[in-house]
Structures are given as C-alpha cells and as structure tokens.
Image: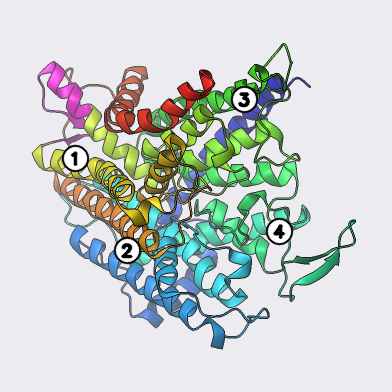
Amino acid sequence: MHPEALFALLLFVFLGLIVLIVKPLGAYIADVMEGRPNFALRLGARFEGMLYRLCGVDAGEEMSWGRYALALVLFNVLGAVFVYALQRLQAYLPLNPQKFAAVRPDSSFNTAVSFITNTNWQAYAGESTMGYLVQMAGLAVQNFLSAATGIAVAIALIRGFARHTAQSIGNFWVDITRSTLYVLLPLSAVLALALVSQGVIQNFDAYKQATTVEARTQTLPMGPVASQESIKELGTNGGGFFNANSAHPFENPTPLSNLLEMLAIFAIPCALTYTFGKIVGDTRQGWVILAAMLILFVPLVVTAFHIEQQGNPLLAKLGIDQSASRAQSGGNMEGKETRFGIAASALFTAATTATSCGAVNTMHDSMMPLGGFVPLFLIQLGELAPGGVGTGMYTILMFAILGVFIAGLMIGRTPEYIGKKIEALEMKLASVFILTTPFLVLIGTAVAVMTVAGRAGIANPGPHGFSEILYAFSSVANNNGSAFAGISANTVFYNVSTGLVMFIGRYWPIVAALAVAGSLAAKKRVPVTDGTMPTHGPLFVALLIGSVLLIGVLTYVPALALGPVVEHLMLATAK
C-alpha cells in the first residue's frame, strides 16, 4: 500500500474508533463522578464505603474550592515524599532482584515530582535504576493517582458551570476515589490483558541472559511491564518501564499493541468532553469542544507525517539518494522502529504530545526539523487537543472563557458561557492559568542557555541544541515528559530546575482552575436571550481555535524561530 494511503487509513480508523468511544465512556464517567445509580457504583459501594471509613472521610460533606485545592496539593505532596523515600531506600527493599542501589537525591527528587504531576519525565534508564517494588508501589501507583487528580479537577470545574448559587464544588476524596476505582482501574486491567496477548511481558523474574546470532551475550530485562504500560497510556502519564519507552519490544511489540496504546492515550481525554456536556445538561457543548480539539490535532499530525515521509533533502543534494519522488527514498526512518514505520510513528508522536502522555515509540530528536516542530508546538499549545486526562478538559475550558470574553468585547456585551457571566475575577484567574506555563518555559530555557550547567547537557550545539532545551522545559512545564533525547538531563542542574518547573506548572494552574470553579458555582444562572452568543456551533469552534492559536503563536514563535525553524532553513540551504 502507498505510504500516504496507509497513513490516511490508519488516521481514519484511529479517529473513527475514538469517536465511537466518546459517548459511552463519557456518559459512564459522568454517572460515576456525579453518583448517579449505575452498575459500577452498586458493585463497588461496600468497598468504597469501607475506604471512606478507614480514612475518616465523610463522603456526604462537600468542600469549598479552597479546601478542595488544599486537600489536592497536600495529598500529592505526601505522594512525592513516599516515592522519594522508596527510591532512597531501594537497596534495603524487597523485589529488587538486580540489587539496584539507592537513587541519587537529585534524581529521586526529580522522579518523585515527575510522577505526582503526571509528567513522568525520566532522566534515568528504568531497567538499570529502579527495582520492581519502586516501579509498582511508587511509580505505577502515582500513575493512577496523578491521572485521578486531573479527572477530579476537570469534574470540579465542570460542576462550577453546572451549579448555581452553590458554595461547594464537590469532595476531593470522593472524586479521586471514584475516578481511580471505577474508571482507571478497570480500564487498565482490561488493557493490560490485551497487551499481554500481544507479547508485552508481565513477571517478577530476574533478568535473563540470551545469546545473540553473533554469539554474544545480551541481558534481557524482565518485570511487571504490562500493568504499568496500561495505566501509563490510559492515565496519559507516559513513564516507560524501559528507557526506550514504547519503542521497546517488551512494552509495545506489534502494530496492534501500538494502535491499542494510542487509543488508550486519547480515550479518556476525548470522553471527558461528553462528560462535560452531560453534566451541564447540553451534550452539544461537549461535541463542540471535541470538534475544536480534533481540528487542532489533525493538520499537525498530517504535517508530521508529510515531513518525515519526505526525508532529508541533503541526501539528494549530496548524491547519496537519487530518488526522483522524494529527497530520501522511503522517508526519514532514523530513530523509528521498522515494525511501525513512518505512518504509525508520526501518529503516535502527535498523539502523545497532543496529550500530556509523553510516551514515545520513536525518538523525537531524530525527526526532521519541522517534523520535530510538530510535537514541540503541540506541547506548547497547552496539550489540549485533546490534552491529558482531565488536564486537557480544564485547560480548553479556560481558553473557552478567554474566547467568550474576546467575543463579548467585540459585540459590547458581558461575556457568558454555559449560563454564567464571565467577569473580572474569572478573567484574571484564566490569565494566570494560561500565562503560567509559557512563563516557566521561556524563563527556564533562558536560564539554561545562559548558564554553564545548562549548556553542558547539550549534545548538538547550534539551533538543534537550543531546540533540545526548549523542548525539555516545554515538556516539563506542560507535564508531558517526552524529550529530544540528545540532551543529557540527569544532572543536578536539570533535575532540580525541571523538578521545580514541573511542580509549579502543575499545581499553580490547578489552583487557578479550582478558584474559577468556586467563583462560577456561586453565580446565578443567566437566562438565554437574543443577544446571547451561541456556544454550540461552528462560530464558537472557530473562536475557540483562534484563541488557542493566538496565545500559542504570539508566545512561542520567537523561541521556535531560534530552534526548529532556523534548523530547517539551514538544512534547506545545505548549511
């Protein structure tokens, strides 16, 4: 099959399956999180109640936005302390058949913050650093809880739109319990079994010694991989059991496992759009949000495929490749797995950076300059097309608030969205939310390129080295976790700086979003009039997309011009 036709078919199947998943999964999440009677709540009611009694939680008591935010931050900080302690005590813990030593303090700090923030930035090689207990009790547990935290924030913000004259936005302990118990656990169990059927390993064996065809000895790492692989994709966490992540054949062995993992990455973020529509009482609102997300996503993934399929123009100029149809016969396969090819690699790359997943089945550092521009730009847009589990939903809702505010200024009316007036407080909080991440990205990048410790990690001087640093801080500030692999980030400077950026980039916007939820919940519902701008049609889709692109383009274009754009121009002129 022609590469373009294969890619078109793969993209059509992928998007078609996602659209089919959205309504049933989104309706199920809405029922679970709002406590509406369904089979899951009936089945787990006794166990759920036992958890509340054990933890001293009153499930019927709701929280103000301030209490909700305080509970969320404290819970996640305690999780970081626990993961840090596991790493530092690893040498004395069981389920460590390779006898790995304790992890360095700076690396332990970075990893602990990374996993509680749903970033899963990994400056270490998992198979040579972490024992099985740390992988399971530390990293895999935080994969569940960080994803559940994102869902909880999204639901709290949605309640802000759905409720009126209310002083509460829900109960954090109930929200995180239900999203873990009824959404993430069952889905990850089913996906883990599907991945095992494709050859993903799941065991507690010591590492194996194998003899290669060259008669050399190779160490094959073992471990409980499928269980971690499933939640890393479903929770848009992205942290790999192995250093090669989803490019490793023990994590992602077949084209079918690759498709399943991509579907898992998109499933919950896309389904939450329908959850939003159902809870606010107008499912058209959810479909409009989903349409905006996919319209942003599709052109960028097509661009990534096209650029990588064309390959490196220098090869033709140097006479290495004389193909008449493209600069590099077969396209740019550097850093890609042959079992996936360019089509599946480009789609996976876009899927994992359009969300906050960060899992990789190809090395982004080996992409063409404009090919690498695509995942970098998708991250910088705020990872809202469709974004991470929960994160994408509450991020695009903040842009929706910005969009209706701009529209209100144009027509001279107080902006309204989902029956709520958007006033000065909401706009101030939305501005803090939207501008926090670009501030962290650009300041972090500037500090790194100005200091000796920051420049020491660059493997490729020039614009590509700048792209590596820009990608790193874009990734950690947006809680993605993927990287241009050429940068050496396992240093004290990068472990500490990226750790701080991850923490601020995660929780400062969350607090702002919860404050917006509290403010909206307290407002009265505004009746629809002839002057109310409809937010369920093509005009609002265009307005929302325009708001996202306006912020993304104005904020990041100067930095992007110094990195991938300059590198592309140098390549085009054979410099």
Spatial separation of the CA atoms under disc 4 and disc 3: 40 Å
Of residues 218 and 164, the one nearer the viewer is 218
Q: Is residue 376 above or below residue 152?
A: above
Image coordinates of residue 107 in percent, x first then y, are: 44, 68
For label 1, the SS is helix
How many numbered marks does the figure carry? Answer: 4
Of residues 540 and 106, the one nearer the viewer is 106
Spatial separation of the CA atoms under disc 4 and disc 2: 30 Å
**Camera-nearest label, 3 or 2:** 3
Residue at label 2? 172
| Quarter-of-image position of residue 526 | top left
**How busy is the neighbourhood of tag 2: few (under 14 within 10 Å), some, or many (20 plus)?**
many
Spatial separation of the CA atoms under disc 1 and disc 3: 41 Å
- Asked whether residue 29 appears in the rendered view, the answer is yes
Image coordinates of residue 408 in percent, x first then y, are: 15, 23
For label 2, the SS is helix
* Relative side of 102 to 256, left or right: left
Residue at label 1? 431
Residue at label 3? 312
Give yes or no for contact between labels 3 and 2 (Cβ–Cβ under 8 Å).
Answer: no
Spatial separation of the CA atoms under disc 2 and disc 1: 25 Å
For label 3, the SS is loop
Quadrant of the image containing the N terminus: top right
Residue type at mark 4: give it: Leu
Magenta segment, which residues? 404-422
**Residue at x-position 47% and y-position 43%:** 355
Residue type at mark 1: give it: Ser
**How busy is the neighbourhood of tag 4: few (under 14 within 10 Å), some, or many (20 plus)?**
some
Give yes or no for contact between labels 4 and 3 (Cβ–Cβ under 8 Å).
Answer: no
